[in-house]
Amino acid sequence: MKSTIRIAGVALAVFAALPAQADLFWHTSYEAAVEEAERTGKPIFLQFRCAP
Amino acid sequence: MDRVNIGLFDYDRYNTLYYFALNTDEQIYLRYGGRDQGGQTSQLHTDSIELALAKGLELHELYKAGKLAKTPKPEPLYPQEIPALYEKTTGAGRCVECHLIGDLQNVQRERDGTLDKLSQMYRSPDLKTIGIELDVPKGLVIKQASGAALKAGIKNGDRISSFNQTTVWTFGDLQHHYDKIARDSKSIRLGVDREGEAYSFDLELPPFWWWTDLAYRNWTVEPRVYFRSKPLSDSEKAELELDRKGFASRVTHVETIADLMGVHSLKVGDVIFAVDDDQTDEIANRAELFIKLRRKAGEPLSLSVIRDGERMSVDLKSARMSFRK
């Protein structure tokens, strides 16, 4: 199986406010997540998922 | 993964799930993930990931306020910079998968003559070996202290706060730093919080503290021998007139595939006392461990064996794994 990177520029900060699952958005581009994190001032939560 | 900075996002690639919390300066706040012999999710829990997320947010606020100490940034490294990895993935029109990074990095090290099997094959030592069983939903809170940890003074309920004076927030952090120490280390220092007070303890590392189960990793560089053995006692060695300091061991299990693949013809009960005339090793205490540490996967070997009181030679050609490569 392929590995994937999910980057949530939003999820980390939103999590602290206990959002609904539907509010979470996962980027698949590191650059896009960094851009959003810079714009919003939020941290990045990055997931590696790999099933050999 | 071909454009991922694997130098920055360095972790044991045989984890199914692994997380990093970081800022846009690429300062990593914490890691969440890791596993032990209990399985892929043995150290994961929704409660502890929530704790990790909350801590990540807290650290981010400190960073924004200029109050977070900077940590050195690792040197960048990209998959295409590892020739063995590039050949098997991007260069062959295939994806770069996490487990392939770990495996082919070791193949490259083997080619370069820099492979350190103790640290690069026996990855992520199990904390239970030193008597630390964590209450997984609670992150780094100790559920049960035993062995070396108990002897050092660690108690149930302590929350681990640092490893060798490096702050750790999660099991992922702890295992990452634990994995980095030299395999000839004799002790580690753990900081703990106990009922609001900070304590520090030096744990003496037991022999073979670094040993981990290689079965699920399918390393290319691991010589597959398809037998297991048990070290002989000093009295058994003396009775057989073998070197007391040697790694002589008695075969306890032979896998059927050994015969099918023509790897060897060992039998349960055989005593292996030498590999290519080597009888001693500063680390290995049994034959298969010596082979895994000191020999290259796929190489032919000659074993000196005692079977039914008779000394003989048994040829062995270890298998070189190529599982889904």
Image (cartoon, coloured by chain):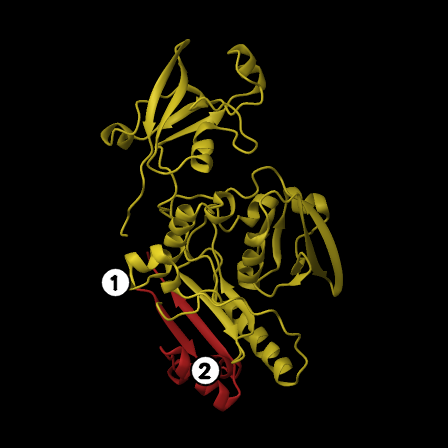
Chain colours: A red, B yellow
Find the residue positioned furthest to the top: B309
- The mark found on residue B160 in the picture is none
Residue B88: x and y in percent read 29, 56
Q: Is residue B135 visible?
A: no
Picture quadrant where residue B224 is located: top left
Badge 2 element: helix
Mark 2 and mark 1 in contact (Cβ < 8 Å)? no
Q: Which residue is mark 2?
A: A34
Q: Chain of mark 1?
A: B
Label 2 crowding class (10 Å Cα cut-off): few <14, some 14-19, many 20+?
A: many
Q: Residue at x 40, y 83 (%)?
A: A32
Looking at the rendered structure, the kind of residue marked 1 is Arg
Which quadrant, please, contains the N terminus of chain A? bottom left
Residue B30: x and y in percent read 55, 69
Residue B165: x and y in percent read 69, 60
Badge 1 element: loop
Q: Is residue B128 visible?
A: yes
Q: Which residue is mark 1?
A: B94
Instruction: Name the one closer to the observer, B292 or A37.
Output: B292
